[in-house]
Image: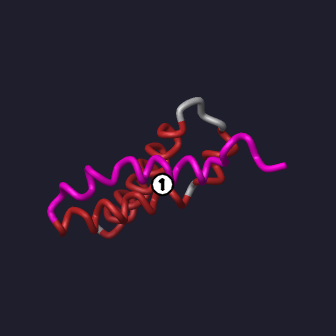
């Protein structure tokens, strides 16, 4: 018997797929940035699985924000 509940990773891919129209409407250079941002959500899918958010978008957004905060700190450390 197969799974009846999709994994977080499967759900995340579904969320990303639902954002496809938004991505298509972006200018080319913004699409590249969008893709990079979406990949950041994938980086922390294990933590999002563990947290078991009632809304899986919450895990995706927290993952993106975490990676952005890390980047800001790296850039500030260069100053």
- Please report the residue visible at 21 percent of the width from the left and 62 percent of the height from the top: 30
> Is residue 9 rendered magenta in the image?
yes
**Secondary structure beneath disc 1?**
helix
Q: In which quarter of the image is the C terminus?
A: bottom left
Residue in the image at 38% along x and 55% along y = 68
* Residue at 49% over, 37% down: 58
The one of 21 and 77 positioned closer to us in this rendering = 21
The percent position of residue 56, horizontal first and vertical second, equals: 54, 39
**Where residue 7 appears, x then y in whole percent?**
66, 48
Left or right: 14 with respect to 9? left
Give, as a single range, the part of the protein colored magenta: 1-27
Tell me: 35 left or right of 56.
left
The main secondary structure of the magenta stretch is helix
Q: Out of 47 and 12, give the one closest to the viewer.
A: 12
Residue that protrudes farthest toward the top in the picture: 54
- Which quadrant would residue 36 be assigned to in this image? bottom left
Density class for disc 1 (Cα within 10 Å; few <14, some 14-19, many ≥20) is: many
Taking the view exactly as shown, the residue that stands out farthest to the front is 1
Looking at the picture, tell me which residue is in the foreground, 60 or 11.
11
Q: Does the magenta stretch include residue 71?
A: no
Where residue 32 appears, as percent x and y from the top left, is 28, 68
Residue tagged by mark 1?
Answer: 41
């Amino acid at each position: 018997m197969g799974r009846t509940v999709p994994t977080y990773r499967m759900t995340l891919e579904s969320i990303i797929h639902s954002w496809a129209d938004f991505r298509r409407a972006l200018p080319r250079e913004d699409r590249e940035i969008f893709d990079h941002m979406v990949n950041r959500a994938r980086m922390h899918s294990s933590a999002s699985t563990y947290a078991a958010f009632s809304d899986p978008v919450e895990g995706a957004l927290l993952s993106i924000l975490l990676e952005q905060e890390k980047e800001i700190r790296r850039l500030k450390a260069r100053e």
